[in-house]
Image (tube, rainbow, N blue to C red):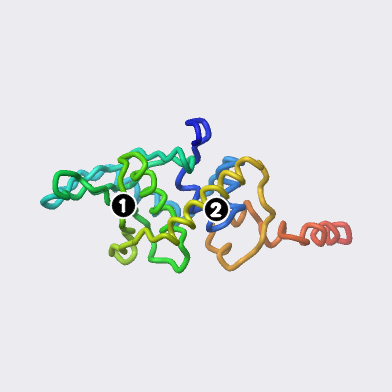
């Protein structure tokens, strides 16, 4: 069990899956660079947090709900948690809002699953499913919290703690994803990537 001082942000799970170096730049070096995509995402989340909304019959909705899981050492806020009437109890159904469209990787699903694991620990119950709402398509994508997704989420949480414990920012590695990353100008993967620093310095000396 992790103490309150050792809890890490749920949002960092998505960052470390997308790029460990980006995760370290944000959460270890405390850097933030905004571009059009991050700005659109921020505005979308602000709208969700301020939304009143009228839930359907048999559904209660909580916005910006505080979450915590001591076993995994995670904390954060859920964009929306719907509580669906199920007999004499209300079952949580987390919904995370994203600005773009559904992705091939599990970055978003792991973040949502982590929210479910927090709710499970907080309410002492089992949650089967949640949803991702994508702003680009204006559609919900149902996410089943399978054993494999739960296992990936747990492993990612432990990897995140290992990164924080090391205090080391990973080396830059350029991939096609870097071109749309807001940190491209700060990270400089084409310059600072593995083996590139030495070549860059040699070019300066020769030049």
Residue 96 image point, x, y percent: 34, 53
In the image: residue 85, left or right of residue 9: left
Residue 65 image point, x, y percent: 31, 40
Quadrant of residue 66 in the image?
top left
Question: Residue shown at 63%/40% (left/top)?
Answer: 165
In the image: residue 13, left or right of residue 41: right
Question: Residue shown at 46%/41% (left/top)?
Answer: 71
Gap in angstroms between the C-alphas marked 1 and 2: 24 Å
User: Which label is found at residue 16?
Assistant: 2
Which residue in the protein does label 1 denote?
Answer: 127
Q: Secondary structure at mark 2?
A: helix
Question: Residue shown at 55%/53% (left/top)?
Answer: 16
Circle 1 Cα neighbour tier, 10 Å, few/some/many (<14 / 14–19 / ≥20): some
Q: Secondary structure at mark 1?
A: loop
The answer to which of 57 and 42 lies nearer the viewer is 57
Would you place residue 131 above or below residue 125 in this image? Answer: below
The answer to which of 134 and 185 lies nearer the viewer is 134
């Amino acid at each position: 069990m992790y103490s309150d001082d050792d809890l890490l942000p749920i949002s960092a799970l998505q960052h470390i899956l997308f790029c460990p170096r980006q995760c370290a730049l944000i959460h270890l070096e405390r850097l933030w660079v905004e571009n059009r995509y991050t700005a659109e995402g921020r505005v979308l989340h602000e709208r969700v947090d301020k939304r009143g909304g009228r839930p359907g019959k048999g559904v209660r909705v909580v916005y910006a709900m505080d979450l915590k899981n001591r076993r995994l050492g995670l904390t954060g806020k859920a964009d929306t948690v719907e509580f669906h009437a199920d007999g004499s109890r209300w079952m949580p159904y987390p919904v995370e809002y994203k600005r773009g469209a559904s992705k091939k990787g599990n970055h978003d699903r792991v973040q949502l699953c982590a929210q479910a694991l927090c709710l499970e620990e907080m309410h002492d119950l089992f949650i089967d499913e949640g949803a991702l709402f994508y702003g680009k398509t204006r559609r919900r994508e149902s996410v089943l919290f399978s054993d494999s997704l739960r296992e990936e989420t747990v492993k990612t949480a432990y990897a995140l703690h290992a990164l924080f414990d090391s205090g080391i920012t990973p080396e830059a590695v350029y991939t096609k994803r870097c071109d749309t990353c807001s940190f491209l100008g700060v990270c400089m993967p084409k310059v600072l990537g593995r083996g590139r620093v030495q070549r860059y310095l040699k070019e300066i000396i020769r030049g």
